[in-house]
Image: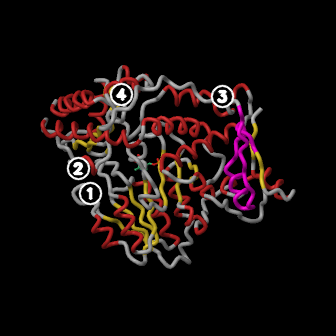
């Protein structure tokens, strides 16, 4: 039998005047229970079980594929490791997949996680505790990935919805700081959200893209004492340009403003430490480098800031106790869960959890080193082959994407289709074709991709 310690249990313990609640290894302690225990000053004490018995979550965990050989000392993944990891992604047998800026390939483990949900739905019918626990586990895994406290993490369904939740949390009529500074390098959906809030009094300004980059000087020039929020992307979706987040945070904070980072093109490709980078709010989704599927996104919000946010985009899962069923007032959750809305995307959370586990297992630092090697190869070869490379040439200032601009009379989507015929997945966006590898890509595959791309573009 599963054992779950819920907020209600803590409430009961409080009513009984208890100062501690003891639970065993098999017990899953929900976020609500943890929050309630903190609030009522009740200690949660884990009883050590002598012989190790698997928790329900462990029993139901997908079978792990054989682990890759031990880590190389530095410089990303060894060839043997990449070959071992490739076995986890069946499509990589026959395809070179460098379209990860759009959608990563399916892994066996993510597929198994989805099947576990399907199996529970099929055989148990209604298994909400298990399903919701899957969502909580995904939030915990995400917290691990960005070095946050799980209480600082909320689940959402897309970066658009996540940004809307945040934007709707500010009372624009009463807020003395009316400006939001966003950038021309945002994925447009983020700017649409801010522009839609102009009707409530929010004023939107844009940091320009200059030579494919955003300049720190422009942050310093445009962010002022009227600025409530700076909403910016970590990595430019079009050309892979990567920003110095800590430097931006310093500027933004010196003006008394907040920093919201769209990390979608970066999550899963290098280490993120929200504390070290001093990020106030962060959004991201899972279908790109985090190896998941559409339908899920996450919000991080710094603990100290949570209380000021009261989203109008809300719902019962954003309330302190969704199961109180009060109908006449709002009672926002204490933690970042206040940004949540309705029934969470369970199936996508099962997939997301497993995808992020893989990333945490491989290690974001090693993925970053691996990707930098691949970037160097793509940039140099692209130039040698005479391709119009529009990405930064400093590999430390770019994410995985190396973008090639197509000629005026060429259509990037046609190029994507032609490459598919050669069993290569690239991603077209606007006038560019993006080559976006991951930790399972080999250097020699980048060579093949660039040569084939040159062939298609010169046809
Ligand atoms: C940086 C970035 N942000 C946001 C999005 C889209 O987010 P969503 O569709 O989850 O709203 C994308 C999609 O490609 C993106 O690259």
- Mark 2 residue element: loop
Assess whether mark 2 and mark 4 are in contact (beta carbons under 8 angstroms). no
Assess whether mark 2 and mark 1 are in contact (beta carbons under 8 angstroms). yes
Assess whether mark 2 and mark 3 are in contact (beta carbons under 8 angstroms). no
Query: Which circle marks residue 82 in the picture?
Result: 4
Quarter that holds the C terminus: top left
Circle 4 Cα neighbour tier, 10 Å, few/some/many (<14 / 14–19 / ≥20) = some
Extreme residue toward the front, this view: 50
Question: Which residue is disc 1 drawn over?
Answer: 213
Question: Which residue is disc 2 drawn over?
Answer: 392
Single out the mark in the foreground, 1 or 3: 3
Instruction: Confirm or reject: label 1 Cβ below 8 Å from ligand 1.
Output: no
Q: Earlier in the sequence, mark 3 or mark 4?
A: 3
Q: Earlier in the sequence, mark 3 or mark 2?
A: 3
Question: Which residue is disc 3 drawn over?
Answer: 59
- Determine whether 154 is above or below 92 in the image: below
Which stretch is magenta?
23-50
Q: Earlier in the sequence, mark 1 or mark 3?
A: 3
Circle 1 Cα neighbour tier, 10 Å, few/some/many (<14 / 14–19 / ≥20) = many
Task: Give coordinates of residue 226: x percent, y percent.
Answer: 43, 77
- Mark 1 residue element: loop
- Determine whether 188 is above or below 66 in the image: below
Extreme residue toward the top, this view: 93
Residue under the image location 66 percent in, 46 percent down = 343
Q: Tell me how far mark 1 sits from mark 3, CA to CA.
A: 48 Å
Instruction: From the viewer's perspective, tell me whether residue 400 is left or right of residue 357.
Output: left
Instruction: From the viewer's perspective, tell me whether residue 389 is left or right of residue 110.
Output: left
Single out the mark in the foreground, 4 or 2: 4
Q: Tell me how far mark 3 sits from mark 2, CA to CA.
A: 46 Å
Q: Earlier in the sequence, mark 1 or mark 2?
A: 1
């Amino acid at each position: 039998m599963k054992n779950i310690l819920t907020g209600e249990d803590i409430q009961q313990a409080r009513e009984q005047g208890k100062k501690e609640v003891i639970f065993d290894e098999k017990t899953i302690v929900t976020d609500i229970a943890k929050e309630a225990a903190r609030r009522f000053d009740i200690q949660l004490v884990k009883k050590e079980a002598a012989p190790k018995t698997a928790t329900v979550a462990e029993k139901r965990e997908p079978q792990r594929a054989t682990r890759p050989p031990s880590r190389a000392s530095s410089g990303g993944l060894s060839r043997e490791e990449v070959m071992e990891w490739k076995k986890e992604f069946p499509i990589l047998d026959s395809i070179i997949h460098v379209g990860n800026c759009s959608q990563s390939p399916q892994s066996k483990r993510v597929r198994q996680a989805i099947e576990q949900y399907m199996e529970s739905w099929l055989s148990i019918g209604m298994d909400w505790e298990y399903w919701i626990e899957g969502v909580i586990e995904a939030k915990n895994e995400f917290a691990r990935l960005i070095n946050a406290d799980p209480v600082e993490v909320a689940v959402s369904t897309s970066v658009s919805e996540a940004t809307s939740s945040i934007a709707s949390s500010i009372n624009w009529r009463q807020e003395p700081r009316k400006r939001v500074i966003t950038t021309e390098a945002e994925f447009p959906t983020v700017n649409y959200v801010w522009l839609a809030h102009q009707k409530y009094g929010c004023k939107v300004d844009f940091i320009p893209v200059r030579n494919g980059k955003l300049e720190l000087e422009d942050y310093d020039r445009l962010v002022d004492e009227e600025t409530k929020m700076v909403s910016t992307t970590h990595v430019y979706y079009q050309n892979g340009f990567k920003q110095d987040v800590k430097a931006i945070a310093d500027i933004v904070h010196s003006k008394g403003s907040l920093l919201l980072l769209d990390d979608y093109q970066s999550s899963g490709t290098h280490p993120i430490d929200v504390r070290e980078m001093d990020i106030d709010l962060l959004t991201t989704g899972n279908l790109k480098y985090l190896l998941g599927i559409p339908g899920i996104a996450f919000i991080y919000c710094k603990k100290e800031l949570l209380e000021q946010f009261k989203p109008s985009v809300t719902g019962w899962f954003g309330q302190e106790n969704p199961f109180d069923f009060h109908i006449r007032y709002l009672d926002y959750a204490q933690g970042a869960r206040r940004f949540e809305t309705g029934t969470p995307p369970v199936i996508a959370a099962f997939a997301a959890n497993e995808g992020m586990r893989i990333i945490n297992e491989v290690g974001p630092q090693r993925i970053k080193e691996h990707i930098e090697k691949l970037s160097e190869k793509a940039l140099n070869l692209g130039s040698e082959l005479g391709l119009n490379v529009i990405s930064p040439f400093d590999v430390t200032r770019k994410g995985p994407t190396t973008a090639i601009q197509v000629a005026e009379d060429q259509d990037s989507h046609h190029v994507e289709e032609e490459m598919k015929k050669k069993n290569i997945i690239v991603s077209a966006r606007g006038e560019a074709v993006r080559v976006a590898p991951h930790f399972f890509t080999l250097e020699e595959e980048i060579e093949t991709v660039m040569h084939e791309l040159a062939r298609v573009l010169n046809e």
